[in-house]
Image: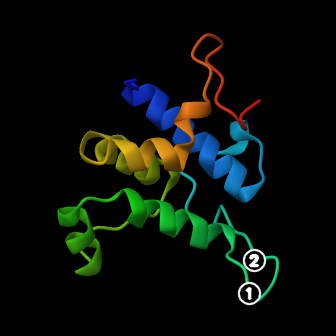
C-alpha cells in the first residue's frame, strides 16, 4: 500500500499528538519541540515524549540523514520539520515510517488515522 505525502504528514501530526497527549488540532506546524511541546517521563526509568520523538526521527532516517544529524548539519526543531522528515524518509525507508506512524491501522475510507479522532 502506498501513502501520499499529505497522508504521511497528517499521520505525523497524529503521532505527535498521541506522544504529547494533546488534541491533534492543537499541534501546529510552527510548534517547537521542547518549547511549545514539552513533556516529562512518567518516571526516571521511562522515556518522555521528546525521547519518543527523537527515536522516531532517528529510526526512520537513512544513512545520509543520520550522518548529517550526527555532524550537526541537520536538525528537526518543529512539527513541520518532523512532518517533512517523515515524508522524505518514506521514500527511502517506507517500512519503518509505516510502522512508526502506525499507517497500517489507518482507515482510508474515513480519512481517519488511529489516535486522531
User: How would you rate the neighbour count of disc 1 (Cα within 10 Å): few for under 14, some for 14-19, many for 20 or more?
Assistant: few
Where in the figure is residue 21, as x and y percent of width and height? 78, 54
- Asked if labels 1 and 2 touch by Cβ distance under 8 angstroms, the answer is yes
Examine the image and state in which quarter residue 59 appears. bottom left
- Above or below, comparing residue 48 to residue 29 in the picture: below
- Above or below, comparing residue 102 to residue 7 in the picture: below
Q: Residue at x 59, y 73 (%)?
A: 51
Q: Nearer the viewer, mark 2 or mark 1?
A: 1
Q: Is residue 47 left or right of residue 63?
A: right
Q: Considering the numbered disc 2 on the image, is that residue within a helix, a strand or a loop?
A: loop
Label annotation for residue 41: 2
Q: Considering the numbered disc 1 on the image, is that residue within a helix, a strand or a loop?
A: loop
Q: Residue at x 24, y 63 (%)?
A: 65
Nearest the eye: 49 or 96: 96
Nearest the eye: 13 or 63: 63
Quadrant where the image shows the C terminus: top right
Q: Residue at x 25, y 59 (%)?
A: 62
Q: Residue furthest bottom?
A: 44
Q: Which residue is mark 1?
A: 45
Distance, label 2 to label 1, CA atoms, is 8 Å
- Above or below, comparing residue 62 to residue 72 in the picture: above
User: How would you rate the neighbour count of disc 2 (Cα within 10 Å): few for under 14, some for 14-19, many for 20 or more?
Assistant: few
Q: Residue furthest top?
A: 109
Where in the figure is residue 30, as x and y percent of width and height? 52, 50
Amino acid at each position: 500500500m502506498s501513502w501520499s505525502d499529505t497522508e504521511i504528514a497528517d499521520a505525523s501530526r497524529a503521532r505527535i499528538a498521541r506522544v504529547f497527549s494533546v488534541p491533534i488540532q492543537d499541534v501546529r506546524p510552527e510548534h517547537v519541540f521542547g518549547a511549545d511541546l514539552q513533556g516529562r517521563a512518567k518516571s526516571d526509568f521511562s522515556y518522555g515524549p521528546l525521547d519518543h520523538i527523537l527515536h522516531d526521527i532517528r529510526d526512520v532516517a537513512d544513512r545520509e540523514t543520520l550522518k548529517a544529524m550526527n555532524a550537526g548539519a541537520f536538525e528537526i526543531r518543529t512539527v513541520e520539520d518532523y512532518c517533512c522528515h517523515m515524508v522524505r524518509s518514506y521514500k527511502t525507508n517506507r517500512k519503518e515510517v509505516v510502522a512508526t506512524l502506525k499507517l497500517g491501522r489507518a482507515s482510508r475510507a474515513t480519512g481517519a488515522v488511529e489516535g486522531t479522532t
